[in-house]
Image: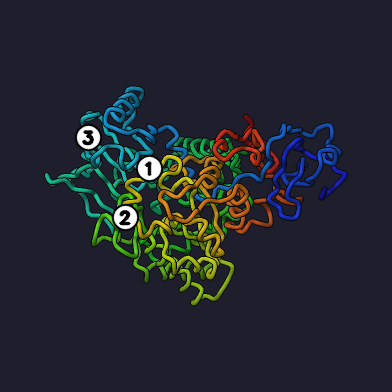
């Protein structure tokens, strides 16, 4: 047993567990002791029992696994919390099923200004969805539904009309209001500038300002602030319920930091949260001063900033991801980047000069290459440092760019639930858009890891379920969708590391969390079963029964 402060009574002990510490020097134990928000001992049950005093809280793991608290390295907390009450359409296919789901949802919400659905498969209908399909289902109330990737929305005529989009609108690069043969909007809205006006018009916009780089104007009233804090807290509770103790949010603004700081003051910040500054292509480099200010003002182990988030492209299914070569099913089209490579390099150089970490949504291989080029420019201009810049998603990559992650010290941030055929994502239309030639290096976690890249895992909630155990199962169960493709799956231990060790490394906190060691933060999760003895196909049955963050129980089944 390793003990810090031996002889002191623990505040809390976890006993009768299969403790997987993720610490190579002491990989397995039976029990853990906690005091003052930190781990003070890990070892045998008998040794830990010696630290029990009259006031010590005892958690009996009953033979279940005890792990470091899960670190969710890519998610959208505010928007995810808001979507908990939306109509969930994942797995719904066919007009009749869609009609029944929408009409039932609408009937239960007679006073909602805008009815919103989420989780829509691009192939929910045999043909492309239009406003006319949705009008057949509901025409007298505004309705809109978003794709599971949140990069496309479909709206009925009522919603388009009231938001001023029925006749189209001028948009920036990479955004599109699909127009019909009648000269009116067809109902499909690609990327945030296209569908943002609907959410803004109906007062649904504060939760997504972290994606647009904006702050609420006018500033919310005291009542609205309280409601937003409660909504954010609901999202944190949802995360704690799934064993999550740390969040790296991937949209952000000062308002979100203020909401979370308000929760902290009320004693309701139950997950450690990192919030970035979102840099958009219309901003000048001077806006990075705001990012530096956020980094300075929020720099604790509970609430921090210090990251710049950027979108370089969109997604494959709507042809908005940026490719090196043409889309397989759309000759002559490679996607339209949100930044030119030169512009992004300028942003990367300046953000890096300020000591900020950069995380860029880059799905197509063209986007991945441009972002790596920008990080290389930052190193050449500012000198080599431990920057840990990140590329988010990396759904397609070229062979020449694979080794650059290790060479540049760039983190590959990837999502096990996202490959076609995994969890709730169908094979089509994605694999046909990618094309057979690019399949071997699509969602290539193993290829990148074997090439020396640090690979961190996450859900991108609400794009996928926030549940890390489902992500772990998806990583372990990953199968090629065609013969001859490389096996990109991870072992159980590698997948666990993707949600613990690598998450801590991704936020420069590997000395304080991501493993269970004396002196580390008391962030841990107790599971309902021994995860190592659970068959891969049954991993989803293993559930968090107790989540502990900072030595306090944040969830108990």
Q: Which residue is mark 2?
A: 320
Q: Residue at x 37, y 62 (%)?
A: 283
**Which scheme is used to colour this image of the protein?**
rainbow
What's the distance in space between the residues labelled 1 and 3, CA to CA?
Answer: 22 Å
Point out residue 476 in the picture as x, y percentages from the top left corner.
Answer: 55, 46
Point out residue 433 in the picture as x, y percentages from the top left corner.
Answer: 31, 53
Q: Which residue is mark 1?
A: 426
Q: Residue at x 74, y 32 (%)?
A: 60
The C terminus - image quarter = top right
Front one among 256 and 221: 256
Q: Residue at x 56, y 46 (%)?
A: 261
Query: Compared to 159, does 249 lie above or below?
Result: below
- Name the quadrant containing residue 158: top left
> Crowding at label 2, few (<14), some or many (≥20) Cα neighbours within 10 Å?
many
Q: For numbered disc 2, what is the local secondary structure?
A: loop
Q: Which residue is mark 3?
A: 133
Point out residue 436 in the picture as x, y percentages from the top left corner.
Answer: 35, 56
Q: Is residue 455 left or right of residue 361?
A: right
Tell me if I can see residue 272 in this picture. no
- Name the quadrant containing residue 546: top right
Mark 1 or 3: in front is 1
Number of numbered discs: 3
Query: Compared to 149, does 222 lie above or below?
Result: above
Say whether marks 2 and 1 touch (CB < 8 Å).
no
Tell me if I can see residue 46 in this picture. yes
Of pointers 2 and 1, the one earlier in the residue sequence: 2
Of pointers 1 and 3, the one earlier in the residue sequence: 3
Question: What's the mark number on residue 5?
Answer: none
């Amino acid at each position: 047993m390793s003990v810090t402060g031996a002889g002191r009574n623990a505040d809390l002990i976890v006993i009768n567990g299969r403790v997987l510490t993720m610490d190579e020097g002491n990989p397995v134990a039976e029990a853990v002791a906690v005091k003052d928000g930190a781990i003070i001992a890990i070892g045998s049950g008998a040794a830990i029992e010696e630290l029990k005093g009259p006031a010590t809280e005892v958690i009996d793991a009953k033979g279940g696994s005890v792990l470091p608290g899960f670190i969710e390295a890519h998610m959208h907390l505010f928007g995810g919390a808001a979507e908990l009450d939306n109509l969930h359409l994942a797995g719904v296919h066919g007009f009749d099923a869609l009609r029944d789901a929408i009409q039932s949802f609408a009937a239960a919400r007679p006073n909602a200004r805008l009815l919103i659905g989420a989780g829509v498969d691009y192939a929910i209908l045999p043909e492309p969805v239009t406003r006319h399909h949705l009008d057949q289902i509901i025409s007298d109330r505004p309705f809109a539904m978003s794709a599971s990737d949140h990069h496309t929305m479909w709206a009925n005529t009522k919603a388009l009309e009231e938001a001023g989009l029925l006749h189209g609108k001028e948009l920036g690069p990479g955004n599109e209001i699909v127009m019909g043969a009648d000269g009116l909007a067809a109902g499909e809205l690609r990327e945030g500038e296209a569908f943002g006006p609907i959410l803004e018009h109906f007062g649904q916009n504060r939760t997504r300002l972290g994606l647009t780089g904006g702050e609420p104007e006018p500033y919310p009233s005291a009542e609205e602030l309280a409601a937003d804090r409660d909504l954010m807290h609901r999202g944190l509770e949802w995360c704690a319920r799934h064993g999550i103790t740390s969040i790296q949010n991937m949209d952000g603004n000062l308002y979100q930091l203020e909401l979370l700081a308000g929760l902290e003051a009320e004693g309701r910040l139950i997950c450690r949260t990192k919030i970035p500054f979102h840099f958009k292509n219309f901003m000048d480099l001077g806006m990075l001063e705001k990012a530096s200010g956020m980094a300075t003002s929020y720099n604790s182990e509970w609430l921090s900033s210090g990251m710049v988030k950027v979108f370089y492209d969109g997604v494959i299914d709507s042809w908005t991801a940026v490719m090196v070569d043409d889309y397989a099913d759309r000759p002559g089209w490679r996607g339209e980047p949100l930044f030119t490579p030169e512009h992004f390099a300028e942003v990367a150089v300046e953000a890096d000069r300020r000591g900020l970490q950069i995380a860029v949504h880059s799905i197509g291989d063209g986007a991945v290459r441009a972002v790596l080029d920008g990080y290389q420019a930052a190193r050449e201009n500012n000198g080599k440092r431990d920057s840990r810049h990140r590329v988010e998603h990396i759904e397609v990559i070229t062979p020449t760019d694979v080794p650059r992650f290790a060479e540049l010290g760039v983190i590959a941030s990837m999502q096990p639930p996202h490959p076609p055929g995994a969890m709730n994502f169908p094979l089509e239309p994605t694999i046909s858009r990618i094309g057979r030639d690019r399949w071997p290096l699509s969602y290539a976690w193993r290829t990148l890891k074997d090439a020396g890249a640090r690979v961190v895992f996450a859900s991108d909630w609400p794009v996928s379920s926030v549940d890390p155990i489902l992500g772990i199962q998806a990583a372990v169960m990953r199968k090629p969708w065609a013969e001859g493709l490389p096996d990109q799956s991870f072992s159980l231990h590698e997948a666990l590391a993707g949600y613990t060790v690598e998450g801590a490394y991704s936020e420069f906190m590997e000395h304080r969390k991501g493993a269970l060691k004396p002196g580390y933060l008391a962030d841990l999760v107790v599971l309902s079963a021994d995860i190592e003895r659970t068959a891969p196909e049954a991993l989803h049955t293993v559930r968090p029964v107790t989540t502990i963050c900072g030595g306090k129980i944040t969830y108990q089944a």
